[in-house]
Image (cartoon, rainbow, N blue to C red):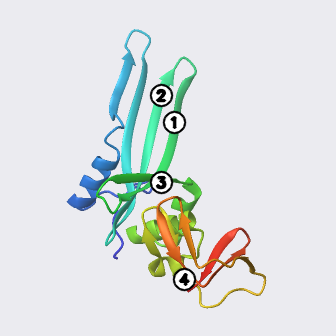
Amino acid sequence: METQKRNSWGALVSVPENVEKLISSATAEVETGIISTHQRKGFWRAVNIDCYGYTLRPLLAVVQVRESTKNKYGISTRKSYALAGRNEDGTTFLHGVPSQKVHAAIRRDDAPGGVVKACEAWIFGCAEKDVPKIIRQGDVALVPCKKLPPTAEKISFETRCIIRESHLLETAGMWVEDGIRKLTP
């Protein structure tokens, strides 16, 4: 994906219409604009949303929700970042990501897709190069590996298990290394 123009804070200046619709749908419960004012004392609270990265296939976006407040102590700003997308049933989701991951991805790769890839890698606990190989169903992701590390310990001899009370998984064995479960196909 080509590099797109960013403002001085790193947010994308323009995004495709379908990305805007995704962001609007995912953040529908977030009231934006100047939300409250106390005109006599000059106090106010404002919220806005910016896009920092996106991919079209699958349709995902990295958004920042920024809340600024002015009170008698001055102006304070709180920023939250999230990966927005759609589940298999069409509902939208927002998954929080650390600001360090977003800004490091922008410094490393200015393309909008690079930011999404870095956030997905953080969410799924894998390397960025493994993100395209992920098999995802809802909030469960399977990351293929070529071979098991020598430190992996077998934790289950069963060939079937249910993950998150909703996903049936059949496997030759389940292994764990550093708290991450690995499966033998």
- The answer to whether residue 57 is above or below residue 41 is below
Mark 4 vs mark 1: which is more N-terminal?
A: 1
Q: Quadrant of residue 49?
A: top left
Q: In the rendered image, which quarter contains the C terminus?
A: bottom right
In this rendering, the label closer to the viewer, 4 or 1: 4
Q: Furthest-right residue in view?
A: 151
Relative to 141, 37 lies left or right: left
Tag of residue 144: 4
The residue lying at 46 percent from left, 66 percent from top is: 115
Q: Secondary structure at mark 4?
A: loop
Q: Secondary structure at mark 3?
A: strand
Q: CA distance from mark 1 to mark 3?
A: 21 Å
Mark 4 vs mark 2: which is more N-terminal?
A: 2
- The answer to whether residue 184 is above or below residue 38 is below
Q: CA distance from mark 4 to mark 2?
A: 45 Å
Q: Is residue 136 visible?
A: yes
In this rendering, the label closer to the viewer, 1 or 3: 3
* Residue nearest the observer in this picture, 33 or 128: 128
Mark 3 vs mark 2: which is more N-terminal?
A: 2
Q: In the rendered image, which quarter contains the N terminus?
A: bottom left
* Residue nearest the observer in this picture, 13 or 181: 181
Residue at numbered disc 2 = 69
Mark 3 vs mark 4: which is more N-terminal?
A: 3
The amino acid type, in three-letter code, at marker 4 is Pro
* Residue nearest the observer in this picture, 60 or 75: 60
Residue at numbered disc 3 = 95
